[in-house]
Image (tube, rainbow, N blue to C red):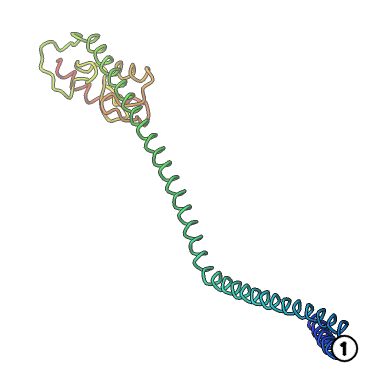
Amino acid sequence: MADDATFESDRYLAACTMGGLLLTAVEPVSGLTILGTCGLGLLRVNARDRQAAVLKSDLHAARQRNELLAAEAARLAPFEQQAISRQRMRALFAGALCSAIALAGSALWIWLYQRKKLREEQAALQVELENFLTYWRQARSGTSRLGNIEVPANLICVITGEPFQDPVICADGHTYERAAIEDWLTRGHRTSPLTNKHLAHVKLIPNHAVRGAVEDLST
């Protein structure tokens, strides 16, 4: 519709120009005035047409740029998605690695702490066992009724260092003097004084065979 109005205005200017030329022959002043006015109108029309052409060219160029940008965006879209996916994977890997390092560090710290604690407990138990053995060997020193008789090692208690008087079998399978092993258990220990392993129970069974062998030596 705008193009129709422009066409009509151009026809009007052309008609006025022809009228001005014809009027010049009869009324020169009026004819020249009309011709001047029409000339200004034609100049404006030309300027308008040039401006419209420039705008149309700019619009066409803008459309082409938009199309190129859209095509380039469509071409780069898969690569952008891949880049985003790689970035996410790197972030997940970094997070997992940090978590693994933290867990490994915590596990190492716990292991070192438990190892240190176990060594301290073992050292304390060893000191207590040595004191216990010293106590019983001093308490039973010289109490044997066998005198200078040579006694086999299997008939001597590892705690008292003296021949058995009342031998009993402990849960670790070894034989001890009853009073000595009962004292060990009364002190709250549930481990073997010989192997340091946990005892399955604290029942003591009389070892009649060892007792009989000691009595045979004394006769």
Q: Nearer the viewer, residue 87 or 101?
A: 87
Q: Sort mark 1 into few (<14), some (14-19) or many (20+) by Cα contacts within 10 Å.
A: some
Relative to 77, say whether 10 is above or below.
below
What residue is shown at x 61% (from left), y 75% (from top)? Answer: 61
Q: In the image, residue 166 lies at what x, y percent?
A: 27, 18
Q: Quadrant of the C terminus?
A: top left
Question: In the drawing, does residue 112 fall left or right of residue 57?
Answer: left
- Residue at x 89% of width, y 90% of height: 26
Q: Secondary structure at mark 1?
A: helix
Q: Is residue 58 left or right of residue 33?
A: left
Query: Residue 169: which quarter of the image?
Result: top left
Instruction: Give residue 142's position: percent from left, percent from top.
Output: 18, 8
Q: Nearer the viewer, residue 149 or 66?
A: 66
**Residue bearing the label numbered 1:** 23
Asked if residue 13 is positioned above or below residue 202 in the image, the reply reads below
Across and down, in percent, residue 152 comes to: 13, 22
In the depicted structure, whether residue 108 falls above or below residue 192: below
The amino acid marked with disc number 1 is Leu
Q: Quadrant of the N terminus?
A: bottom right
